[in-house]
Every structure is written in structure tokens, then in C-alpha cells.
Image (tube, helix red, strand yellow):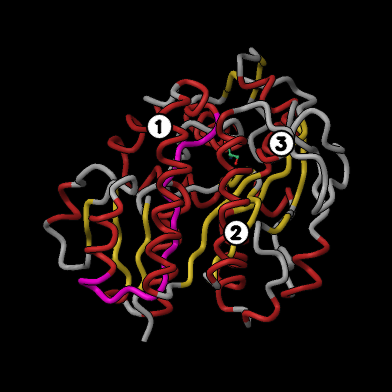
Amino acid sequence: MKTILVTGARGQIGSDLVSALRRRFGATQVIESTRKAVPHLEGNLLPYEVLDVTDEHRLQEIVEHYQVDTIYHLAGLLSAKGEQNPELCWNINVNGLKNVLQVAKSHQLRVFWPSSIAVFGPHTPKLDTPQITVEDPSTVYGITKVTGELLCRYYAYQFGVDVRSLRLPGIISYSTLPGGGTTDFAVEIFYAALKYGTYTCFVRPETRLPMMYMPDAIAAILHLMEADSALIKVRSSYNIAAVSFSAEELVAEIQKYLPEFTCDYAPDFRQAIADSWPCVIDDSRARADWGWKHTYDLPAIVADMLAKLDERLMRVGQESMVCAQSLF
Ligand code: SER
């Protein structure tokens, strides 16, 4: 039976991943952890721990206490937040990962760790970005992801750690908001469209970035982690892709359902970050090595997002509206 620790469990990906893992492996087999205490989780019957991943000793204690065999290490700062606090970004993203790899080495754990399209930079080919290419990130977040990939590969080849990773694109989802990323506009826009009928986008209309719907991201992570070890030929991180679209294409798709919806554009510092990233990623290695394929294209994402978010906003009512409002 698997015993799984998820760090950063209440982030955008963690929230959906914990539910998927609990459905698959049993609710009590998945230990959620967060850096700051979440009171309602502490009173909960399901396994939960407060864990700052920069504390290796505490991480080891939790792994030994629960006899963890797999870690999904999601704790980390995203690109925009990283620029606002580069030191914290380095500490959590690099030192946190190094601690996870150390504990994985001493306890023979399997590890999933998300890298990002942010490993690429202004000199990387923007179209069909290859698996192996120039990595010259202009953000500290990107630098931590390049460093992390090298650490993963090093621990895999030097110490036999079974670490697996994906260079995730922007992830679109309705259950938890992303926090502090450059691709966040592609999630915020849905809340704004439903609540206000208008949105001010922080990147220019023609900004085209790789994106993926959360169900595809969860499927990719689970698929990668369940693949036979011999199939995992890239131990730094796999390019992975689903769709690429510009901000204005996203607006046009939303307008098919909400014709009154309007979007204006006020690019801020995140424009430069977006401009340094690729538009379309070549993920043929992931497709060939372990059979990755995506399901959701742009029309399918927009249809599902609007339906699910509308239903959710209606269900949780005023409280959720206030949360969504605090975004803008
Ligand atoms: N979605 C992330 C960000 O925008 C990219 O990995 O920071």
C-alpha cells in the first residue's frame, strides 16, 4: 500500500492532486502538508502536518512517522511572487527540493517535483521548444527551476533516487486559485467574466503561452508517477504540453458563452516574464517515452471552466464571491 506525502498541499495543484490521490490510494494514505497551519485541517480526521520544507529534520520526522514511500513535492513560490522576494524563492524552491531529495535518498522514496516552462528564456526557441535547448531564464523562479532540474538529475544518476518531473505550463483550474504566477490571468479572467463581465488583463492581447487544464495536469502527474521506471529516460524534467493560446483568443472563446464580456489590457512587470517564455512546447519525448497525451483543447477548457465555476460560485454563494473579489 502506498503512503504519500504532499507538500504545498493547499496550493492550486495540491488541492486537486490530494483529492485525486485520495480517490486512488485511500484517504488515510495521503498526508497533506502546508507551510502555515490551516486550522480546519488540524481538526480534521485525515492525516495533516505543518511542514516548512526548508526544515530537513522535520521532513525526515514526518517521513519516518508515517513510513512515507512517495512524495509529491509541490511547495514552492511561483514566478511573479519570486520576483518580489528572490531570497525566499531560492530558499523554498532550491533548499526545499534539496531536502526532499536528501530524505528520498536515505529512505528510498519516489519523488514528483514540478519544473516549469520558466526554465526557458529570451534565447530559447519560442516555437516547438525542444526538450534539450537553451535555458537562460530571466526570473529567479526560472533559475530555481533550472537548478532544481540539475539537482534531480544529479540525485537520480549519482544516488539512484527515483525522481520524476514535468516542465508544467500555466495551469487552469476552478477549485483553487493560483497564487503569484505569470499565467494567473488565464484563471482570474474566468472569475472576472462571471462576476463582473469585465477583466483587466496584465499581459498584452497577443501574448501566447503554453497552458493546460487541471484534469490533464493531474493525469500527466499520475501517469508519470505510475510509469515503469525504465521508461523514464529524462531525469531532469520532461517538456509537457497541451494547448497554447493568446490572451485575446481566450477572451474570444469566453465571449462565445458571455457575449457581453469585455477585456482591457494593462500590462505590468509580468509582461516581460511572459515575453521571455516560449509560445509552443515540443513534448514529443514525454509522448514517446511514457505515452503522454492531453484531452482538453481551448474550447473544451472554456466550456468546462465556465460551467464548473458558475456552479461553484452559485453553490458557495456570497462567501466565495468575496474571495474572488479580493483577487482584483
Ligand atoms: N504558472 C507558472 C507561473 O506563472 C509557470 O510555471 O509562474
Q: Is residue 258 left or right of residue 122?
A: left
Disc 1 residue type?
Answer: Ala
Q: In this view, does 142 lie above or below 101?
A: above
Q: Position of residue 73 (x, y in %)?
A: 44, 56
How busy is the neighbourhood of tag 2: few (under 14 within 10 Å), some, or many (20 plus)? Answer: some
Secondary structure category for the residue under label 1: helix
* Residue carrying label 2: 154
Residue ID for mark 3: 250
Residue for point 81% across, 72% down: 288
Q: What element carries label 2?
A: helix
Quadrant hosting residue 249: top right
List x then y, in percent, for residue 265. Answer: 67, 15
Inspect the magenta stretch and tell me whether residue 256 lies in it.
no
Q: In this view, does 9 lie to the left or right of 251?
A: left
Specify the quarter for ligand 1: top right
Which residue is more in the foreground, 251 or 291? 291
Q: Is mark 2 within 8 Å of ligand 1?
A: no
- Tell me the tag on residue 324: 1
Instruction: Between residue 53 and residue 41, name the one nearer to us.
Output: 53
Give whichever of 221, 155 is nearer the camera: 155
Structural distance between the alpha carbons of marks 2 and 1: 41 Å
**Up-down relation of residue 299 to residue 139 (above or below):** below
| Residue range highlighted in magenta | 64-79
Of mark 3 and mark 2, the one earlier in the sequence is 2
Which of the image's four quarters has the N terminus? bottom left
36 versus 265 height, above or below: below
Instruction: Return the disc, 3 or 1, that comes first in the chain's sequence.
Output: 3
Residue 231 location in percent, x, y? 70, 78
Q: Is 75 one of the magenta-colored residues? A: yes
Amino acid at dot 3: Leu
Please state which of residues 147 and 201 is positioned toward the viewer in this rendering.
147
